Image (cartoon, grey):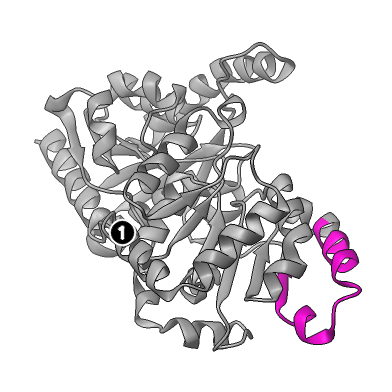
């Protein structure tokens, strides 16, 4: 069985696609070709996972006029031509796309070549790419029940978000043991801070300014993003210069985590993060409460805000808008939560209610069913 797997741009689209690709290879010995964009993080992550990667030019489709909009549109046509050629040569039995702006050329190229497509919707509302790809999809899987109204009921399934096996396996590790493995204090509450694979400057800045107040009550493990590491390091060092050594030792800053990310999440008592679908899926699987700072609609569209609102309605997370995020507010809300075992436990249970640990298996099974039907 040959399967085209596509998802690109950021880790939020790539990791779910890799979870499906790995499942197909492990269970069905499928021959997998990963189709990604030529400027995304998949160029690093996909070969590292042992998969063949073909790349095309893929333009991000924006709803406003700018230089980036124009250059993005200019990349679309050559990307689609390349994708059609790649799919024709590979001749897959079925295609899977987990979103990102490479989803459109992947879906179109597949259907032009007569290949059925399973399109996966991760966030609550579909972005423009998935809105364009949806009519091309043979079947649509969604992660959350709130997404069902966006798509035709006859071809839409609620299956959850694919997740890496390592994220499921890390549940067997006690949080205290995870902290020890990372060189952290086993007994001190841990706040994990992450802005996603590309980092988040405003989030980093506010956390650094809040460090003296936060470190009085917990340890902080901050993932800055590679491009933002140096400026975050400098700001943190400046703000902690007058603090005693005990408090300074409670802070850890790294640029990026890949293999150790599941362990870091499992180690945390509370996670301060954006509200992309993959991040929320991981919080749900591990039963981790979150303080969510969604991207503003002007930057990331409505997806993160709707994702965060859904978690907050179920009391699985506390939401702070990007504009509202200030050091004093951050300290007050984090300390209130992390020092209350009762509230943390209740939020953890609420987050866990969103978990669909069988999602990777269920989506893989559906892909195989579609492929077998196509072969017949």
> On the picture, is 120 further left or further right than 282?
left
Asked if residue 281 can be seen in this view, the reply is: yes
Image spot of residue 50 (x, y percent): 48, 61
Residue nearest the observer in this picture, 126 or 325: 325
Image spot of residue 65 (x, y percent): 66, 11
| Quarter of the rendering containing residue 308 | top left
On whether residue 88 falls in the magenta region, the answer is no
Pointer 1 local density, CA inside 10 Å: few below 14, some 14–19, many at least 20: many
Find disc 1 in the rendering and name its residue: 350
Look at 60% across and 25% down and name the residue there.
298
Q: Mark 1: which secondary structure?
A: helix
Look at 35% across and 53% down and name the residue there.
315
| Quarter of the rendering containing residue 3 | top left
Image spot of residue 280 (x, y percent): 42, 52
| Quarter of the rendering containing residue 24 | bottom left
Magenta-colored span:
232-253
Eyeballing the image, is 195 above or below 283?
above
Tell me the quarter of the image containing the C terminus: top left
Image spot of residue 274 (x, y percent): 55, 48
On whether residue 246 falls in the magenta region, the answer is yes
Look at 54% across and 88% down and name the residue there.
187
Eyeballing the image, is 134 above or below 245?
above
Residue nearest the observer in this picture, 220 or 149: 220
């Amino acid at each position: 069985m040959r399967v085209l797997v596509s998802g690109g741009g950021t880790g939020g689209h790539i990791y779910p696609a890799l979870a499906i690709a790995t499942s197909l290879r492990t269970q069905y010995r499928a021959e997998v070709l990963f189709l990604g964009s030529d400027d995304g993080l998949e160029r690093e992550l996909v070969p590292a996972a042992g998969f063949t990667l073909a790349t095309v030019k893929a333009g991000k489709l924006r709803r406003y006029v700018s230089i980036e909009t124009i250059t993005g549109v200019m990349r679309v046509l050559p990307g689609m031509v390349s994708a059609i050629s790649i799919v024709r040569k590979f001749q897959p039995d079925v295609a899977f796309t987990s979103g990102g702006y490479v989803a459109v050329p992947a879906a179109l190229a597949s259907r032009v070549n007569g290949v059925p497509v399973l399109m996966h919707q991760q966030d609550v509302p579909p972005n423009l790419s998935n809105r364009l790809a949806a009519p091309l999809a043979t079947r649509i899987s969604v992660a959350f029940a709130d997404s069902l109204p966006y798509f035709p009921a006859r071809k839409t399934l609620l299956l959850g978000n694919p997740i890496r096996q390592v994220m499921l396996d890390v549940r067997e590790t006690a949080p205290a043991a995870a902290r020890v493995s990372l060189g952290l204090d086993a007994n001190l509450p841990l706040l994990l801070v992450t802005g996603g694979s590309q980092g988040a400057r405003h989030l980093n800045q506010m956390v650094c300014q809040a460090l003296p107040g936060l470190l009085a009550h917990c340890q902080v493990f901050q993932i800055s993003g590679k491009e933002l590491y140096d400026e975050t390091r400098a700001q943190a060092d400046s703000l902690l210069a007058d603090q005693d050594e005990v408090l300074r030792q409670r802070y850890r800053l790294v640029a990026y985590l890949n293999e150790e990310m599941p362990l870091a999440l499992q180690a945390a008592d509370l996670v301060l993060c954006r509200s992309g679908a993959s991040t929320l899926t991981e919080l749900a699987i591990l039963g981790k409460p979150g303080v969510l700072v969604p991207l503003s609609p002007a930057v990331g569209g409505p997806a993160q805000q709707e994702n965060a609102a859904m978690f907050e309605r179920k009391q699985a997370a506390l939401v702070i808008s990007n504009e509202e995020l200030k050091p004093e507010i951050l300290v007050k809300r984090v300390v209130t939560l992390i020092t209350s075992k009762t509230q943390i436990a209740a939020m953890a249970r609420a987050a866990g209610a969103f978990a669909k640990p069988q999602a990777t298996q269920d989506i893989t099974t559906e892909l195989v069913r579609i492929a077998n039907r196509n072969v017949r």
